[in-house]
Amino acid sequence: MKTPTDTQAREWLRGMFDAAIASAQPAVCLPPHLPTPPRGRTVVIGAGKASAQMAQVLEAHWPAPVTGLVVTRYGHAAACQHIRVLEADHPVPDAAGMAAAQQMLALVAGLTPDDLVIGLWSGGGSALLPLPLPGITLAEKQALNQALLRSGASIGEMNCVRRHLSAIKGGRLALACSPARVVNLVMSDVPGDDPLDVASGPTVADPTTLAQALAIVQRYGIALPPAVQAALGNPSSESIKPGDQRLGPIATHVIATPRHALEAAAEVARRAGLEPIILGDALEGEARDMGTVLAGMARYTASTPSARHRVLLSGGESTVTLRSTAPGRGGRNVECLLSLALSLKGLPGVYALAGDTDGIDGLEPVAGAIATPDTLERAAAQGLQTTAALDAHDAHRFFGALGDAVVTGPTGTNVNDFRAILITAPG
């Protein structure tokens, strides 16, 4: 195979990213997992960036009457006939999300053993269903959420804290559905694909404890207002545990995962004559550190003559600890990518794409970006300060100025981060 042109390398990377997204579309992965209709009512609930599209697909395939309510991020709604779709803010919760959570609890009240609740859960659901425990205000919950996002805590750590301060998460919504049967259909965006961490597990029992939640807050030095501190020390705030006899029957199916997405990308790579290597679907850590490590792997691979036309694929969820007060426009994927580009120092023949499969990296309506062997050279020609952009968490502005942003719009799915590093020639 000849060494590809810059245009072809970009097309290969974008083709792999698009395939990863397509493999996790609700229309593909949801219908095979639909349960048998019940004797009684069917009520659909859900939250997440893909919940509206999931509800739309369910309506198209469900053979019986259905009602319900799902909440998604602003701009991610899809038209449904019988299931109400509400929108709220993400990643910082708002009053619309709180109202949606209250309505959802009211919707499942009074169900019977003959009824069926179908839960449609995807990434982002935790912020979209904020319902603080009594005594805690939404403003206090918002401040804590922002502090967790800035701290560098993992998604599992953040969700543990959220569950123990919520009146709906950590199995509390499942308890409200009892004695009806609950079937959860989950699109995983978390390392390890634990349903407990998708939307903070409203309809699955929670084995974690208040003591663990408090330890996480202390580990990251997050100051708590008195009401939140009191709640984390109050045994009545404990979440619903596995084996709780008050729960009705619950079945949970993970219908889309980061691994599925990486395997779809790998197949695209093979058809292009590339050798895909999946490094893992659950990589975690500080985004800029991950970029440095991935650059080292790419450099080693490029140094091997037999490694021509190889692509390194990975997924998971990195974190960003904010170290700058500058108003940067960044996201964890582009921060990882910019760190990688800096570490590679223009290594010939190495291209990379990093993006979020939901189409939004951080707060920007941009999925991610592409880095090329001449990224640093082109940046210097435009007067862009690469290291300064990384330190200011301003990678979206950096790649946007180079014309290398990857824009998809809301994708209708969410299986977390996607990274592909293409090695087209030995270094």
Image: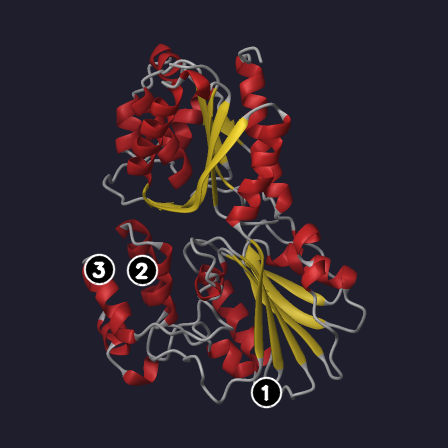
Q: Which mark is residue 250?
A: none
Q: Secondary structure at mark 3?
A: loop
Q: Amino acid at mark 3?
A: Ile
Horizontal side of residue 176 vs 332, given as left or right: right
Of labels 3 and 1, earlier in sequence is: 1
Q: Which one is nearer the viewer's eye here, 354 or 250? A: 250
Task: Between label 2 and label 1, give the one nearer the viewer.
Answer: 1
- The location of residue 396, given as percent across then percent down, is 41, 32
Q: Secondary structure at mark 2?
A: helix
Q: Amino acid at mark 2?
A: Ala
- The location of residue 358, given as percent across then percent down, is 54, 45
Q: CA distance from mark 3 to mark 2?
A: 10 Å
Residue 276 seen by the camera: yes
Q: Secondary structure at mark 1?
A: loop
- The location of residue 251, given as percent across then percent down, is 58, 73
Of labels 2 and 1, earlier in sequence is: 2
Viewport quadrant of the C terminus:
top left
* Residue wearing tag 1: 179
